[in-house]
Amino acid sequence: MYTPLSYHDVFPADPSSYQNVDAILYQGKTVYATRQENGKYQIDQLLSSDPNDYLNDDFLPGRIIS
């Protein structure tokens, strides 16, 4: 199987590691984000078919959003 994702993204070692990950809408775009203890989210991945969305700093992985 060919994929640009890493082996661990396709076959995660521990399913509980995704327990706090949610698909949420942020500025009209769907992102996977990890829910933190303070109720905010940290962006893990942007899901978009528009290449320009990936150039927007608002959707950078690691960005903290509320």
Image (cartoon, grey):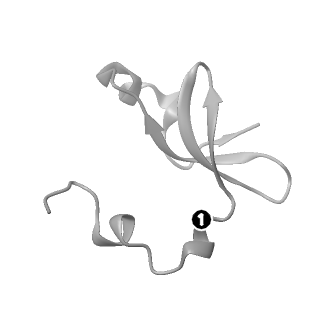
Q: Is residue 58 left or right of 26 when viewed as pictured?
A: left
Residue 27 appears left or right of 56: right
Q: Where is residue 10 in the image (x, y as percent from the top left)?
A: 34, 65
Image quadrant assignment for residue 58? top right
Residue ID for mark 1: 18
Q: What element carries label 1?
A: helix
Quadrant hosting residue 56? top left
Q: Nearer the viewer, residue 36 or 48?
A: 48
Q: Which residue in the rendered view is the most extreme toward the left?
A: 2
- In which quadrant will I find the C terminus? top right
Query: Which residue ends up furthest to the bottom in the rendered image?
Result: 13
- Residue 8 on image: x %, y %: 36, 72
Q: What's the residue type where badge 1 is placed?
A: Tyr
**Residue at 46% in and 37% down:** 46
Which percent across, then down, holds residue 19?
Answer: 67, 65
Answer above or below: position of 59 versus 43: above
Query: Would you call the spot at circle 1 few (<14 residues within 10 Å), some (14-19), or many (20 or more)?
Result: few
Residue 7 at x, y = what percent? 29, 71
Q: In which quarter of the image is residue 32?
A: top right
Residue beneath the point at 43% across and 73% down: 12
Is residue 27 placed above or below 3 in the rendered structure?
Answer: above
61 lies left or right of 8: right
Q: How many labels does the image show?
A: 1
Q: Quick one: 59 or 10, which is closer to the camera?
A: 10
